[in-house]
Amino acid sequence: MTLLSERHQSSTRSRAPAWERTLWKLCSPDPAFDRHTPSVRGTIANYLIAVVAIVAATWGRMLFDPIVGDRHPFVPYVLAILFTSWYCGLWPAVFALVAGFLAAAFFFATPQGSIAISGSDMQVGLGLYIAVGFSSILFSGLIQSANRRTESIANQLKKKQIDLELEIQLRHSAEEERKTLLRRFISLQEEERLHISRELHDHCGQEIIALELGMKRAVDIVKIENQREVLACFQEVNEILDRLSREIHELAFDLRPPSIDKLGLQTALGSFLEHWSQRFRITVDFECRNWDEQRLTSEASIALYRVLQEALTNVAKHSKSSRVSVVLELQRDSAVEIVEDHGIGFEIDASAEDSMIRQSLGLLGMKERLASVGGNLEIESAVGKGTTLFARVPIRTNKE
């Protein structure tokens, strides 16, 4: 349809009577809901169907003419109008209304052979025919308009649903990519820790041991010569070297304990807890329940070890507790690490737990590390009743 013809139709509709404009608005295709304009061929087919409906109504009325005579000549044409308005649209239905009137008046109404309507009964029947016809057209147009709008809304909802599903998939993919990158980052971090630990042990440690031996030899020589001031200086330096050696050893152990790779998580945690208890003079109770080292991945073992390190660091700094309980338990589908102290505790709001974790770098690190292996972190605490930490990681199934 050209722009000129669209303007012509628009001006024609604006000059039409009010009732016609109302019918056109209700029954004609709404561009917002029906984007396909009927073709010329489709319009001709609709009018042909209207003609066929009128012919069929006329033929049916002729069959019943010996029975009913000239009574009720408009009834079959009302049925034709209902069908035409439902199937063909507004203007074919209006055409069927006019054609039905002409056919009924010419063939069946008194006097036959003329379109003139005589007699009060026929005039009342004509009035009812026109009223019912226009009502049928209007009602059918309303139904078609409602159907078009319903279909359009359904299509819009379907499109929004598809967009929403796509957005969910994209977010899920982004979350999986984030977890993969975090897992890779932690893996590289552990590899670097292992490398630094070996370097400290193999190079710096050996050099410090050699320096300690040299200092002891120098101390022995000074003792023989009885130079007290020089001897005191050497002894002070020797003590500094001894402390430095222990600190480097502890640093290498914290970076990557060798037992976690060779002997497993249970042994590594036991060794770490013993060393930590001696260092901070806090009693530690360690218990393993239903433990199977083979069902835990290397990444999950390292995650639980790092979480325990950070948790005990917080205990030493903040809890003021003299005793800590650590439980390592293998449940049906997860491994659980429980760290419980008997310190001062703190008030925790369940609704603000995530906010608290985000504000604490240590807790955030524990949560991110556990999330990288599919685990989660929970904290329970109360003022004066200590704090309990639950770290869960998934385990291998028996089939795996």
Image: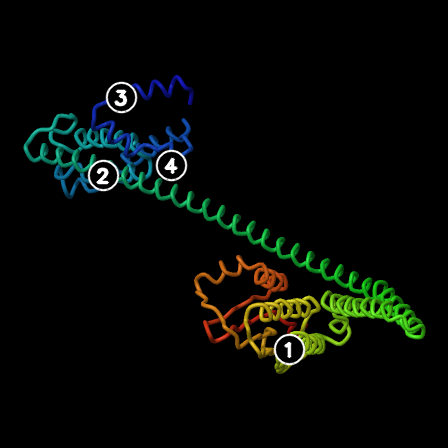
In the structure shown, which secondary structural element does the residue marked by tag 4 occupy? loop
Label 4 vs 2, first from the N-terminus: 4
Image coordinates of residue 57 in percent, x first then y, are 25, 38
User: Which quarter of the picture shows residue 198?
Assistant: bottom right
Amino acid tagged 3 = Ser
Image coordinates of residue 45 in percent, x first then y, are 38, 31
Residue at numbered disc 3:
14
Q: In front: 300, or 246?
A: 246
In the structure shown, which secondary structural element does the residue marked by tag 1 occupy? loop
What is the tally of numbered marks visible in this picture? 4
Cβ–Cβ under 8 Å for marks 1 and 2: no
In the structure shown, which secondary structural element does the residue marked by tag 2 occupy? helix
Label 1 vs 3, first from the N-terminus: 3
Q: Is residue 346 above or below residue 181?
A: below
Residue at numbered disc 1:
281
Q: Is residue 169 visible?
A: yes
In this rendering, position of residue 318 left or right of residue 222: left
Residue at numbered disc 4:
33
Q: CA distance from mark 3 to mark 2?
A: 24 Å
Q: CA distance from mark 4 to mark 1?
A: 78 Å
Label 4 vs 1, first from the N-terminus: 4
Which of label 4 and label 2 is nearer to you?
4
> Residue visible at 45% across and 72% down?
383
Amino acid tagged 4 = Phe
Image coordinates of residue 392 in percent, x first then y, are 58, 70
